[in-house]
Amino acid sequence: MAHALDSGLRQGLAALELTLSDTQVQQLLGYLDLIQKWTKVYNLTAVRDPAEMLTHHLLDSLAAIRPLDRHLQGLGLAPAPVRLLDVGSGAGLPGIVIAICRPDITVHCVDTVAKKAAFIQQVAVSLKLSNLRGLHARVESLTQPYDIVSSRAFASLVDFTNWSGGALAEQGVWMAMKGKHPADEIAALPSSVEVFHVEQLVVPGLDAERCIVWMRKKV
């Protein structure tokens, strides 16, 4: 029997011009089911309605996949092994979605809350995502270099770049998913951080502003 959200997800993927295999579609739907199951006990997300989860969580994160692909090609990183760190990952957004859509990218999701890191590990096992790992740690303690450091609706840009600076590879970039264009946050960034692109996103079924702020260390 088809998953109740199967057609909605496929329509969203078509609108985002994303091509995924049936296996990847099933993994995304399986991930949604796991969020629902765990949220009853662990309160992973405030969004409880499955249809709302599809737009606010899955499609919202999926909107970042093509921009991410473009930047990896522009950086000359694709198809070399790419390491991505998702900061304050919570229920694994967008990290788990990236891990499902791009199995060639090593994705580590870090959260200071142990049960959230444990959930990400559970998703990796349940959905057989060998490229995904949940880390229970403070991002400031991570010093292994990552090519991309991402966050979604996390802290201010100043705090995000400050806390995760030690984990960003020399040629790496920060990918901060935000709602409205965060002009004030951008203005508050130190001179050591350069915003090189702000990318507007359109999320199917979501009537809200979304963007990605792309940043790097100023040389």
Image: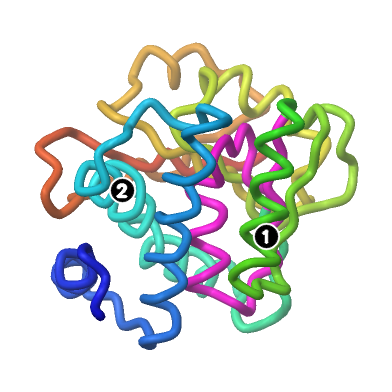
Residue 29, given in percent of the width and then of the height, sits at 37, 65
Mark 2 Cα within 10 Å, few/some/many (few <14, many 20+)? many
Q: Is residue 11 left or right of residue 29?
A: left
Q: Quadrant of residue 124?
A: bottom right
On residue 191, which mark appears? none
Q: Is residue 85 left or right of residue 153?
A: right
Query: Regarding mark 1 in the picture, which secondary structure is present there?
Result: strand
Q: Amino acid at mark 2?
A: Asp
Give the mark, 2 or 1, whose residue is nearer the N terminus. 2
Report the residue at 44% width, 16% height from top: 185
Question: Would you place residue 139 above or below residue 188 in this image?
Answer: below
Q: Which region is colored magenta?
A: 85-111
Report the residue at 51% width, 27% height from top: 43
Q: Is residue 92 magenta?
A: yes
Report the residue at 76% width, 31% height from top: 114
Q: Is residue 169 magenta?
A: no
Residue 9, given in percent of the width and then of the height, sits at 23, 66
The residue at which mark 2 appears reads as: 60
Is residue 171 among the parts visible in the rendering? no
Quadrant of the drawing holding the N terminus = bottom left
Is residue 14 or residue 162 the one in the foreground?
14
Is residue 140 or residue 76 the one in the foreground?
140
The residue at which mark 1 appears reads as: 107
Please tell me how many numbered marks the rendered image carries.
2
Question: Would you place residue 41 above or below residue 91 in this image?
Answer: above
Question: Would you place residue 117 above or below residue 78 in this image?
Answer: above
Mark 1 Cα within 10 Å, few/some/many (few <14, many 20+)? many
Residue 169, given in percent of the width and then of the height, sits at 78, 51
Estimate the spatial distance between the alpha carbons at disc 2 and disc 1, rounded to whole Å. Answer: 18 Å
